[in-house]
Image (spheres, grey):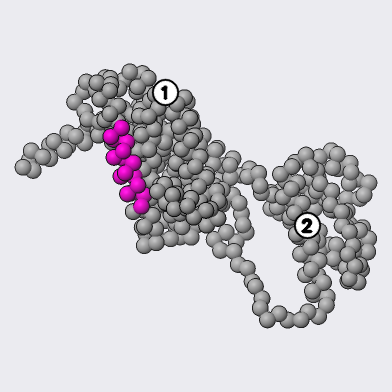
Amino acid sequence: MSRHGDPALLAWLRTVARLGVKELRSLWRDRLLLLLVLWAFSGGIYSAASSAPDTLRRAAVAVVDEDQSPLSQRITTALYPPSFKLPEQVSVQRMDAGLDRGLYTFVLQLPSGLQRDVLAGRAPAMQLNVDATQMTQAFVGAATIERIALGEIAEFVQRDRVAVPSAVELELRMRFNPTLEPRWFMGVMQLINEITMLSIILTGAALIREREHGTLEHILVLPVTPLQIMVSKVWAMGLVVLVAAALSLHFVVQGALHTPIAGATALFLAGCALHLFAMTAMGIYLGTVARSMPQLGLLIILVLLPLQLLSGGSTPRESMPEAVQFVMLGAPTTHFVSFAQAILYRGAGLSIVWPHFAAIALIGAVFFIAALRRLRLSVARQG
């Protein structure tokens, strides 16, 4: 029995391997799609992580210090990199000219008698001039400078006066990202988004491309089954995304962005392979529903945006309505984001993330069966 079964299984696997190699060759000839993969896992991740619009990085700031007191110097030295460039001391006459020429985004004017008025219990007015043409930086930076200045004043006053000891003191300690570096978070989240997006696009486009080029009819005359067609597309496109993700994690996230990885990258890539199994099956399902590339693009937009926005990568799941949290448990991206953050940020092991692995495997099996059924119906219509 085994002697007859093993050759049949080997022949089945050889057919799947050959069909997968054909998919890889088709992707190699599609230079535009190949360029998309290369850019998404290199420049796309680096640019998204380095140019986050809601973060303040190396903003040009100047200080007009008319007080020349220890308090004013304390406020000036609190404006330091990486949020700001080193503050430049300017006069009142140079302040407006520097803003007009775009040399400074912020100019903080500390009035004469600042320290005296603060110690006397008065509320002196500090003036912050902002170049509002850089709108996002202006909004974030103004709030940051205000927080820094008020914090330094409060600490200065507390040290000058005899403070009543408090019964409870709150001491904050940032774990996993002590400096609150946004690139560390944005780089990994963008990598997760690219893995999800490219896995759907590549498999869906592979099926649509065969239908548009007429090669699907050629495959149907061969002794292959829809299961073999689907498995070949899943392993070929999944392998491309997995290799690109591994290289991007090493060279872009860890290398160019200098993001520390706390956990085992092998464990993350193993979970990534499970996620690719689910998302490539979804891509094939969308490829059977769409009749052309434009239709596939519209479907991907409708499916991909909710998957990415509601998975917990952009907004914490705890801040979402309970109904949304419950529904999104059926999405593989929710579990992918959860175990990716646990492994890469917090160094979690398999004993912690295995429920997410099991959930993705189950969801992927459901997607695979549904996509296989749709593919069989599509093949029957083509026949």
Which residue is at 32% across, 49% downward? Answer: 362
Q: Is residue 319 magenta?
A: no
Query: Which residue is the extreme one toward the front?
Result: 323
Location of residue 141 in the rendering, given as x and y in whole percent from the top left corner: 74, 50
Q: How far across and how far down the image is residue 156, in percent?
A: 81, 70
Q: Is residue 367 magenta?
A: yes
Label ID, residue 60? none
Location of residue 97 (image quadrant): top right
Judged by depth in the image, the label closer to the viewer, 2 or 1, is 1
Q: Which residue is mark 2?
A: 146
Q: Which percent across, then down, holds residue 347? A: 45, 60
Q: Please state if 272 lies on the left or on the right of 4 as rendered.
A: right
Which residues make up the magenta segment?
Answer: 359-374
From what the image shows, is residue 49 above or below residue 145? above
Q: Work out which quarter of the rendered image holds the C terminus and state it.
A: top left
205 relative to 186 in the view: left or right = left
